[in-house]
Amino acid sequence: MSTPSPGDFAERLRRRERLVGYWIACDNPVGTERIAGLGYDYVGVDGQHGVMHQPGWQSAMMAVDARGIAAGVIRVPSADPVVIGTALDTGARAVIVPMIETPEQVRTSVAACRHWPVGTRSLSGPVRAELRLGDVPARVDRQVACIVMVETAAALESIEPICSIEGLDAVYVGPADLSVALGASHFGDPSAAEALESALGRIVTAAEAAGIACGIHCLDGDSAARRLAEGFTFVTVSSDITHLQQAAAAHLRAARSAG
């Protein structure tokens, strides 16, 4: 069996293989390059809430590609086709589109990831996307995945029609926002735990019925393993900025524990 490569990511996602990713919030290409060589299937770059904005997306994708192991993925700020096209032009293998609530928004996102005649994406020309994915539109489209987020009450209510949109590759749960949408005062609020678990079950079932992948963001590796066992097909583990803080705090406690 051949070793999976970044170029296989979209097809592996569509086949609903189990994939594990990592989240990058910091604009730190050197750190991103280190993470990309650890063996994660993908490295997601946060272009919505992270400190990295469009000028940093290309450096992040180059850092991920440098190791030849993980696929670079970008969460864009919105379903704006121009922004989606910009992210894909950096060489991203997939985009994650946040705050999706209607099937029509899904259609717009999917179209922005595909060239004519099935979509609205413009040919990139001599930029990183062409270097990594080629210049034949249909071939490029097969190597790019469109993932939309489920994180609001409206998205949950429309989850079945959302999952059924032709060309959509995956749905991805943002558990923090979804928790608040279900009545939690904060992520982890025990009063909304049962409602959240019920919602997650519904999302997994809808995605499976539609034959598309279903992912979720997790706080740690143990949580990620549990979600995979529950039927999610891909999981993202924590983030660089979270682990940086956790590691620094742990070492500080250790240093100050000397008697």
Image (tube, rainbow, N blue to C red):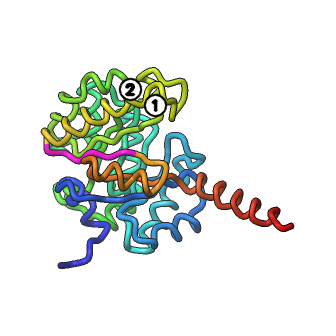
106 relative to 246 in the view: left or right: left
Is 81 placed above or below 24 here?
above
Q: Nearer the viewer, residue 160 or 191?
A: 191
Q: Secondary structure at mark 2?
A: loop
Q: Quadrant of the C terminus?
A: bottom right
Q: Nearer the viewer, residue 78 or 200?
A: 200
Cα separation between marks 2 and 1:
7 Å
Residue hosting label 2: 152
Is disc 1 surrounded by few (<14), some (14 to 19) or many (20+) residues within 10 Å? some
Residue at horizontal 49 percent and vertical 30 percent from the top: 190
- Residue 121 appears in the picture as rendered: no
Query: Which mark is drawn over residue 156?
Result: none
Query: Which mark is drawn over residue 177?
Result: 1
Q: Residue furthest right?
A: 259
60 relative to 121 in the view: left or right: right
Q: Which residues are magenta?
A: 211-216
Q: Position of residue 200 (x, y in %)?
A: 31, 35
Is 230 placed above or below 67 here?
above
92 relative to 203 in the view: left or right: right
Q: Earlier in the sequence, mark 2 or mark 1?
A: 2
- Amino acid type, label 1: Asp
Residue at horizontal 21 percent and vertical 41 percent from the top: 168
Q: Secondary structure at mark 1?
A: helix
- Residue 106 appears in the picture as rendered: yes
Q: Which secondary structure type mostly characterizes the magenta part of the structure?
A: strand
